Image (cartoon, rainbow, N blue to C red):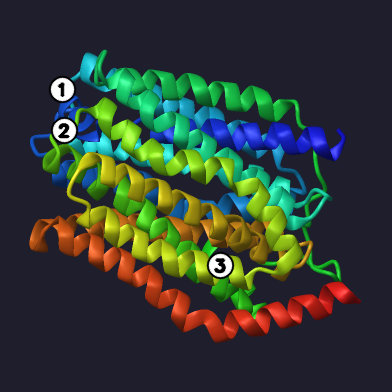
Amino acid sequence: MPDRRARTVLALVVFSVLLAQVLLYPGVDRLVGALGATTDLDASMWFLAAEFGAFVLFAGLWGAASDAAGRRVPFIVAGALGGALGYVGLALLPQLVAPSFEVVLLVRALQGAATIAPFSLAMTALMELDGGHGRNMGAAGIAIGSGTALGAPLGGQLYGVTPLLPLWVAAGVLLVAAGLALAVGEPAAGASTADGTDRDRDSFREVVAGLQRTPALAVPYAFGFVDRLTAGFFALVGTLYFRSAFEATPATTGLLLGAFFVPFALLQYPFGVLSDRIGRTTPIVAGSALYGVGVVLVGLAPSVPLVAAAMVTVGVLGALMAPATMALVTDLAGSGERGAAMGGFNIFGSIGFLVGIVGGGTAADAFGFETAFLLAGGLELLLALATLPFLLRLDVDRRALFAR
């Protein structure tokens, strides 16, 4: 399959996974109530955390397994089908039995373990295409942003029909993702080291080994952690903040989340191409620092219109840094290690999302929403400042490498 067509189809797979995922966010408190929860903040926190805990455990495993097999598509299809089954299981549980919420969380974790495969491996296949790492990761970024941009407002509307409807739609979307993956020609995947010897494929050990071989990967991993931390923070704390502070309905909450994700989606590709031309440092550092300030402003905005404006600004800044960060992983990883490297990036990102959910929920409960927004935005700003010297050195090394 030509690279342009493969890029489009793989991006659509990523889009489908993110669309299914974000459909649940705008009314997550209503969803957990329909699934038997008796609290809003705590139950929502653990419902979101269960999925991303599974992401952490299985992202590297899927990547390492596909590297070992030298194929991506069968794992993408299997994961998408398994994720669809998990969403159906969640939707059927309250109709078949009166499950404890612990059972709900178990099914949610199994769904997450499957769903990470099409997300992570489709991005891995994208970065193995020709055409420039920034271009390919820009396509992934558009898919991520578009899926979340559409998923937030659409999910808000679906909750207006019934709290369980987003689960059924999410299952259908993942079935579409499985069908799309079957249309992709198999890109080459590195399954061994340069000397032909297979590496240990345990997910966490492989990520640690990759960091030992290429310590510079710690830089994009750190940004992936903090960027996804703020995403997890918005998924839980932002959603409940909009619902409580402004008495927003799920539909309005979905639109506010969409105010971030629409510019985030539309600007990913051009900013990814820009990072190919000017390097990764400026988009990552400038975008992250200003992004942190924007997160704080969302929590300080006194009205829904001002919150929406702040969310748009944060979306633009997120689009500036995200494809450059993912492309930096590709710049640094060897051709035979990219599946595990992207799996590692997603492990750190998923840990960040998990910390954003649990830490953000805990901080909001203990100190209030305003302090929680300050902590989340401040962490992003501090990371940008702390890593600036390392990024400057990496960009110099990158320019020297690509000039050869």
Residue type, mark 2 in image = Ser
Real-space Cα distance between discs 3 and 1? 48 Å
x and y percent of residue 190 in the render?
Answer: 78, 57
Q: What SS does tag 2 mark? A: loop
Q: Which residue position holds label 3? A: 284
Residue type, mark 1 in image = Ala
> What residue is rendered at 80% in x and 48% in y?
129
Q: Residue farthest to the right?
A: 404
Q: Which residue position holds label 1? A: 98
In the rendered structure, find residue 266 and report the number of the disc placed on it: none
- Seen in the picture, residue 363 relative to 282 is either above or below; the reply is above
Tell me the quarter of the picture where residue 140 sits: top right
Q: Are marks 3 and 2 in contact (CB under 8 Å)?
A: no
Q: Which residue position holds label 2? A: 100
| Relative depth, front residue between 323 and 104 | 323
x and y percent of residue 93 in the render?
Answer: 26, 22
Q: How crowded is mark 2: few (under 14 residues within 10 Å), some or many (20 or more)?
A: few
> What residue is rendered at 74% in x and 48% in y?
69
Of callouts 3 and 2, the N-terminal one:
2
> What residue is rendered at 73% in x and 50% in y?
135
x and y percent of residue 86 in the render?
Answer: 41, 29
Q: Do the residues labelled 1 and 2 touch (CB within 8 Å)?
A: no
| Relative depth, front residue between 240 and 314 | 314
Of the two numbered discs 3 and 1 in the rendering, the one whose residue sits closer to the viewer: 3
- Seen in the picture, residue 382 relative to 270 is either above or below; the reply is below
Q: Is 142 positioned to the left or the right of 72 in the image?
A: left
Of callouts 3 and 1, the N-terminal one:
1
Residue type, mark 3 in image = Ile
Real-space Cα distance between discs 1 and 2? 7 Å
Q: How crowded is mark 3: few (under 14 residues within 10 Å), some or many (20 or more)?
A: many
Q: What SS does tag 3 mark? A: helix
